[in-house]
Image (cartoon, rainbow, N blue to C red):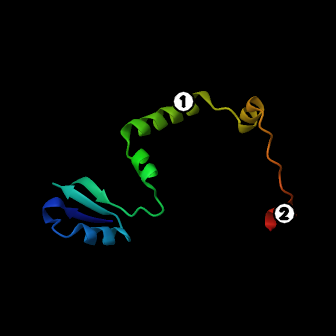
Amino acid sequence: MKTIDIKKATGQLRDYAEIAEDEVVVVTRKGKPVAAVVALDDADYESLSLSTNSRFVEIIARSRARLEKEGGIPSDEVRRQLGIPRPKRRGRSEARN
């Protein structure tokens, strides 16, 4: 990870983006992180947008807490309720191919 104070970050954004291909570049102000330049390997705009949306992140956190507290519904039960047949299991010889 590379850090740079915002007052010293006078390079082109392109340069920081190239550095970010190998390591995260954290921009700081008075020693505290304020931004980061990171590589987005195989990321799409929708995933990036959702992962940085505080409202969506809160929904996920609440869902995980509820799952931890109350438990979930096994996938076999969901399939039964929705009338979805269980996928056929492949034999050992098929799975190796």
In the figure, is residue 42 to the left or right of 31? Answer: right
Residue at 45%, 64% (x, y): give it: 41
Percent position of residue 4, x then y: 21, 64
Percent position of residue 54, x then y: 37, 39
In the figure, is residue 8 to the left or right of 47? Answer: left
Q: Amino acid at mark 1?
A: Arg
Percent position of residue 50, x then y: 43, 45
Which disc number belongs to residue 38?
A: none
Q: Which residue is mark 2?
A: 94
Q: Which is more toward the observer, 69 or 19?
A: 19
Which disc number belongs to residue 66?
A: 1
In the figure, is residue 49 to the left or right of 86? Answer: left
Q: Which is more toward the observer, 70 or 9?
A: 9
Image-quadrant location for residue 69: top right
Percent position of residue 36, x then y: 30, 58
Count residues near mark 1 (Cα–Cα under 10 Å), then give few for <14, some for 14-19, many for 20+.
Answer: few
